[in-house]
Image: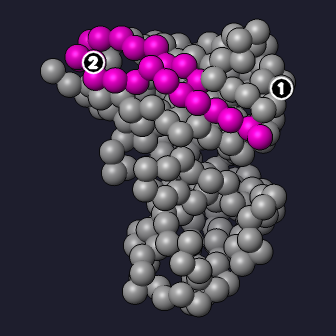
Amino acid sequence: EVQLVESGGGLVQPGGSLRLSCAASGFTFSNYWMHWVRQAPGKGLVWVSRINSDESRTTYADSVRGRFTISRDNAKNTLYLQLNSLRAEDTAVYYCARVVSGSYSFFDSWGQGTLVTVSS
Amino acid sequence: DIQMTQSPSTLSASVGDRVTITCRASQSISSWLAWYQQKPGKAPKLLIYKASSLQNGVPSRFSGSGSGTEFTLTISSLQPDDFATYCCQQYNDYPLTFGGGTKVEIK
């Protein structure tokens, strides 16, 4: 069974940093592109970032480019998202999600999400 | 960016009703559209991909249609477990974008 388990969320002050993790199991993690998607409280889903299977390609939404960094450790079956220079508008549940392939970027598996709250 | 617009934003229906949700793209996305179901406090669940392909394990009462800029999700006979929020997502181009969601409520 595919499992994705996020961790690392919490309360952080504006301008602060956090690192989110997503532990994967039940599939060959190193074969899949992985993404982060976020959802502000009561709002819709917003795509954040993606990384290819060997970490050679990354893509970011304009709203986070230069502040967030996606990475992965295939030996540890773990996806990461480093969040720097956090703003109030970054407050959201952050989901990691698996896509079928790099060309077909729909999400067939999701984690349960981890809440990031940016507030003073 | 490709904008995805869903309608209605809220829908009140009864068990057994046929329900249709519309998703419109701001430009053609061919058939590169997915539909998700989300319940409060839970992650989204994939229902449909490539506009009309049913994800494994999803009940056949769910169906999708459309291409280009207009798409629909239909639930042929609404069941109690189907009261949830539904959203569409285009994967024709980056950034990937989602519709704002349609909440299906009990009438």
Q: Residue at x 77, y 74 (%)?
A: B60
- Work out whether residue B101 or residue A65 is closer to the camera in this orientation and state it: B101
Residue displayed at 59% across by 82% down: B78
**Relative to B94, is B98 above or below?**
below
Q: Is residue B94 left or right of residue B42?
A: right
**Residue A58: x, y in percent?**
65, 18
- Between A120 and A77, which is closer to the camera in this rendering? A77
In what quadrant of the picture does the C terminus of chain B appear? bottom left
Report, in whole angstroms, how far the alpha carbon at label 2 lies from the one at label 1: 33 Å
Looking at the picture, tell me which residue is in the foreground, A47 or A42: A42
Looking at the image, tell me whether mark 2 or mark 1 is earlier in sequence order.
2
Indicate which disc residue B11 carries.
Answer: none
Is residue B59 depicted above or below A18 in this figure? below
Q: What crowding class fits label 2: few (fewer than 14 Cα within 10 Å), some (14-19), or many (20 or more)?
A: some
Q: Is residue A93 left or right of residue A99?
A: left
Name the residue tied to disc 2: A12
Q: Which residue: 63% across, 19% down?
A: A79
Q: Over which residues does the magenta segment extend?
A: A1-22
Which element type, helix, strand or loop, lies under badge 2? Answer: strand
Residue type beneath disc 2:
Val
Residue at the disc numbered 1? A28
Q: Is B102 a magenta residue? A: no
Q: Residue at x 23, y 16 (%)?
A: A13
Q: Quadrant of residue B17?
A: bottom right
Q: What percent of the width, then of the height, locates residue A26?
A: 78, 32
